[in-house]
Amino acid sequence: MRLLFITATALLLFQACQNEPEESQASSYLVAEGKTMGTYYRVTYDDSLNRDFSREIDSLLLAINDEISTYIPSSTISRFNRAERSLNLGLEYRDFAECLDQLNSCAGVPNTHFLRNFLAARVVFARTNGAFDPTIMPLVNYWGFGYTPKKAVTNADSLAIDSLLQYVGFDKVSLKAADGPVILQKASPGVQLDFGGTGQGYGIDAVADYLEWKGIKNYLVDIGGECRARGLNPHGKLWTIGINTPKSDAEITDFTRIVQLQNMSVSTSGNYRNFYEVNGQKYSHFISPKTGFPEKRTLLSASVFGKNCLLPDAFATGFMVMGLDEAYLLADELEDIEALFIYSDENGQLQVKYTPGVEEMLVE
């Protein structure tokens, strides 16, 4: 973790506007950065008191990982995945219910990070008709994209995939929380959870909520390219980010569209980074919970916008499984959600389609 002071000539990651900021404006902006969730994080914020929140941000992200990371054997999600039938989450539901709306009031209440991810996942599972399903974990591992040793599947075994599909389905996980301790139950020992489709968005919101609790009004929280923005950047303008061109050989600064975030968040999922190729066939990490196979669609990336980042993160994953047409219809229907899709047409050319609200975000 490093804390940096932004000078008048500093450039922000993803910032497309290159105008020189006023020295007085830029001098109050700081950057805290480090690594989390298998990627980087970068938190840029305006604080005239020059407070260093590095330690607190680092501790918060570590606490989140200790509950939702499948790569940590002692995490809550790993213990649930190993459990035979249930896991006592170690808290009374009334304690969790009291702090649902304000994360910072949950200090000392165990497994609130886990439960928030679980409840958000349940909402998006329902809205996407099961396209977003965190019980996909056994199949993610089978295809070599999970916490088990990475390996390319050179010869898919349909019988093995069918046998794993019996463990997939969010209806196979239930929360017993009406009275007494919160207990998470599963239909059979093979059922496992994966919050890879919500974790980064949740982490962004948690850090952003902490900053706001500390009185910060201008900030950009970025974890692995997913962002939540509030207020203005060091140039005194809206935060500006680029939507990456969805090609495996594209540079990180190769953008298809530039957008301004006016108190908005954005999460992008794409099949052009995390994939492998066998005999000329590409296999992406977006696994269909209905077929058990990686999706093969013309949709290359989905960027989802919302006030906070948790739901856009989950919807972006669900949209990639649904495909362009179905995803666009749902995105256009959802309240407080906008989406921009990049897809390949019949000639192999990149095309862009977006919901009406994206128009006003685009920078010419």
Image: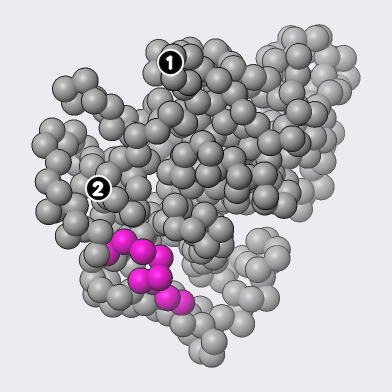
Amino acid residing under circle 2: Asn
Which amino acid, mark 1? Gly
Which of labels 1 and 2 is toward the front?
1
Q: Residue furthest bottom?
A: 179
Q: Indicate left or right for 86 with 37 as reference.
A: left
Residue 49 visible, this angle = yes
Query: Whole-Å distance between the Cαs marked 1 and 2?
Result: 30 Å
Sequence-first tag of 1 and 2: 2
* Residue at 46% across, 53% down: 132
Neighbourhood count class around disc 2 (C-alpha, 10 Å): few under 14, some 14–19, many 20 upward: some
Residue depicted at 76% across the width and 14% down the height: 364
Residue at image location 68% in from the left, 40% down from the top: 338
**The magenta stretch spans which residues?**
167-175
Q: Are marks 1 and 2 in contact (CB under 8 Å)?
A: no
Above or below, comparing residue 116 to residue 61 in the picture: below
Q: Quadrant of residue 285?
A: top left
**Element type at marker 1?**
loop
Nearest the viewer among 86 and 64 is 86
**Where in the figure is residue 363, as x and y percent of width and height?**
75, 19
Helix, strand or loop at label 2? It is helix
Compared across the picture, whether 292 is left or right of 94 comes to left
Left or right: 361, with 285 as reference point:
right
User: Badge 1: few (under 14), some or many (20 or more) residues near its Cα, within 10 Å?
Assistant: few
Q: Is residue 66 visible?
A: no
In the picture of the structure, the residue carrying the numbered disc 1 is 348
From the image, tell me which residue sits under label 2. Answer: 141
